[in-house]
């Protein structure tokens, strides 16, 4: 598990790597592991650098699967990630699924892959996904048929929907089942976001919910 030096941008209270309870003020630097890094970045508490991420990222059996488009040439070369274009699937132990239309950076992809990696697979997140950037609920999107189906399966439409344009997935029996069921619904004409909601709740996959602005600090231009 890699270690990173990060800078606090808001007050951080945590246990350091030696187990001591420490408070860090904005501007303070401290060291953390990769799983904690993803959580701290998710909460907007720290800053890190692409160089530090690159030095600590384990690219073994990890890659990017683009769906409906090609990734920019050499986009992930610095991180040693293989890139393929194809359909729904998990070619690697850790796969970033990138649909056409989703805006991503190499750093965001790598941090997401780190989020579904852990020393103990039984305790690790199996998937990670961002909430819809417009903060919509299931009642606000899709056809009446999709809404009725979601209501039937989940019993409520007051559920936040996910941005399915970018997903990070660790290959397990459960995530393979999630992709199988989800892709089957989409192929049958279901709204992609409603189908995703129905599938993740039905399968009870260990999903890490990321805020809509999670990758905002990595966007340029």
Image (cartoon, helix red, strand yellow):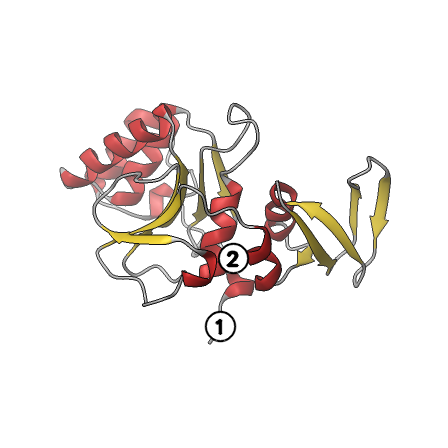
Residue shown at 45% from the left, 52% from the top? 135
- Up-down: is 91 above or below 50? above
Residue 16 x, y percent position in the rendering: 79, 42
Which numbered circle lies on residue 220?
A: 1
From the viewer's perspective, is 17 left or right of 35? Answer: right
Q: Give neighbour class at mark 1: few <14, some 14-19, many 20+ (Cα, 10 Å).
A: few
* Left or right of 124 in this view: 147: left
Q: Residue furthest left?
A: 188
The residue to which callout 2 is attached is 213
**Quarter-wise, where is residue 168 in the image?**
top left
Q: Is residue 164 visible?
A: no
In the figure, residue 148 lies in which quadrant?
A: top left
Tell me which residue sits at (83%, 57%) in the image: 25
- Pick whichever, 35 or 186, lies toward us: 35
Q: Position of residue 62 (x, y in %)?
A: 41, 44
Secondary structure of the residue carrying tag 2 is loop
């Amino acid at each position: 598990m890699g270690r990173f030096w990060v800078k606090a941008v808001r007050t951080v209270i945590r246990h350091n790597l030696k187990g001591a309870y420490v408070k860090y003020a904005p501007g303070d630097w401290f060291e953390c592991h990769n799983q904690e890094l993803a959580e701290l970045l998710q909460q907007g508490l720290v800053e890190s650098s692409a160089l530090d991420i690159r030095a600590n990222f384990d690219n073994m059996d990890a890659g990017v699967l683009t769906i409906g488009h090609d990734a920019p040439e050499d986009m992930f070369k610095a991180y040693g990630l293989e890139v393929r274009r194809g359909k729904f699937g998990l070619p690697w132990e850790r796969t970033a699924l990138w649909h056409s239309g989703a805006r991503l950076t190499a750093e965001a992809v790598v941090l997401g892959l780190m989020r579904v990696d852990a020393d103990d697979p039984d305790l690790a997140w199996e998937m990670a996904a961002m909430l819809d950037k417009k903060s919509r609920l299931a009642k606000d999107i899709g056809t009446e048929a999709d809404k009725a189906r979601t209501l039937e399966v989940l019993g409520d439409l007051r559920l936040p929907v996910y941005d399915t344009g970018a997903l990070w997935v660790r290959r397990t029996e459960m995530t393979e089942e999630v992709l199988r069921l989800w892709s089957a619904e989409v192929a049958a004409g279901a709204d992609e976001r409603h189908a995703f909601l129905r599938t993740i709740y039905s399968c009870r996959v260990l999903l890490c919910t990321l805020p809509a602005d999670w990758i905002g600090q990595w966007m340029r231009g």
